[in-house]
Image (spheres, helix red, strand yellow):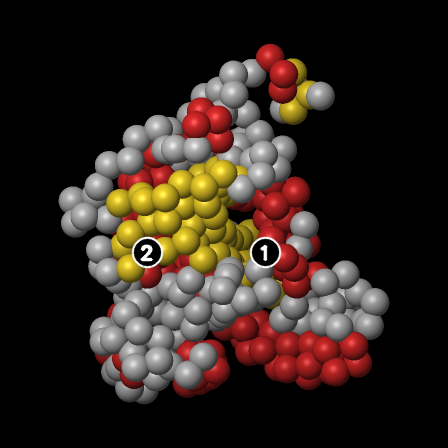
Amino acid sequence: MSVGGASADSRPPDPVLATGSMLASPNTADGSRVGAVTVDGDRTIRLAVYSAAMDREIQVDVQRPADTSAPRPTLYLLNGAGGGEDSATWKARSDVMDFLADKDVNVVTPVGGAWSYYTDWIADDPVLGRNKWQTFLTRELPPLIDAGLGTNSVNAIAGISMAGTSVLQLPIAAPGLYRSAAAYSGCAQISDPVGYNFANTVVAAGGGNSANMYGPAGDPGWAANDPYVHAEGLRGVNLYLSDGSGVPGKYDTLDGPNALPGVGGLVNQVAVGGALEAATDYCSRNMRAELDRLGIPATYHFASTGTHSWGYWQDELKRSWPVLAHGLGLPA
């Protein structure tokens, strides 16, 4: 079998998969660390990573590169509002892990952060608890991944829906950490009334109170974390933004790939998914106008149809791969 133009049998075994342990498992300065390492199949491992900021262990799933004979880059792939804690995940609802399997990239997906926007909340929430995901994804997890997996410390990030906001916030918060960012059906403009209402609705759907995230409506904390307001911070990042219009498209059928089951599922996908996609399309187009005003290049795909659903996101990740790969130093 040949992978990436070389004989897979001639390559040395992946030391992480072969031993079931990280190459190095240092603590970060604040005490974050890798605990258990579990081999889960012939290409994947599951890490238990203690976050000092959140004072709990976070499950982190890793798909190893096709070729581990040299240090490889890392793609941080974020799930949507469920945080990977439900069945609505990249692995369960798409074929993108298969698509990425022949790429020389570590694919790192944290499991957790439902309804949190993967950000640092200003207060603990009675329902959602302590959320310090920005700290985890910029200061705690990357050095552990780099040391433990022997990466080349080159990173990209991609995410859907709720995480489509996060993957634009995080490169602004940590300049230089992520060289590419792809946002699929995300709302970048969170401090204007439409964007605020979208974010507030997402958090409330999980039982949380968004005032514990950035403060009440109109609080300066919302603008301080708004990628639209701070778009200048994305200069130099390889960017990809995509959205549908909310109008039903090719995957909004009973037998479409990754469709929700049954007539009720289709109605939900078209009605609720259509409204959500129309809202994120509004945000994304405003973000494009702001990036254009600033002279910051990006790649866009704004489709004339499409709802807030997995068939479209699966396509968009594949369509965005050349942008992600460019920042990772990989062939498209």
Q: Residue at x 61, y 45 (%)?
A: 97
Q: Residues within 10 Å of mark 1 (few under 14, many from 20)?
A: many
The picture quadrant where one finds residue 217 is bottom left
How many C-alpha atoms fall within 10 Å of the one at disc 2: few (<14), some, or many (≥20)? some
Distance from label 1 to label 2 (Cα)? 21 Å
319 over 165 or under it: above or below = above
Residue receiving disc 1: 90
Disc 2 marks a residue whose amino acid type is Glu
Q: How many marks?
A: 2
Farthest-out residue, left: 29
Residue drawn at x 42%, y 62% is: 112
Give the secondary structure at mark 2: strand
Image quadrant containing the C terminus: top right
Asked whether residue 172 is in view, the answer is: no
Q: Which disc, if any, is residue 299?
A: none
Residue occupied by mark 2: 57
Residue 115 locus on image (x, y percent): 43, 73
Position of 124 with respect to 234 (left or right) is left
Residue at the (38%, 70%) spot, across then down: 116
Residue plotted at (33% across, 65% down): 119
Most distant residue in the top direction:
10
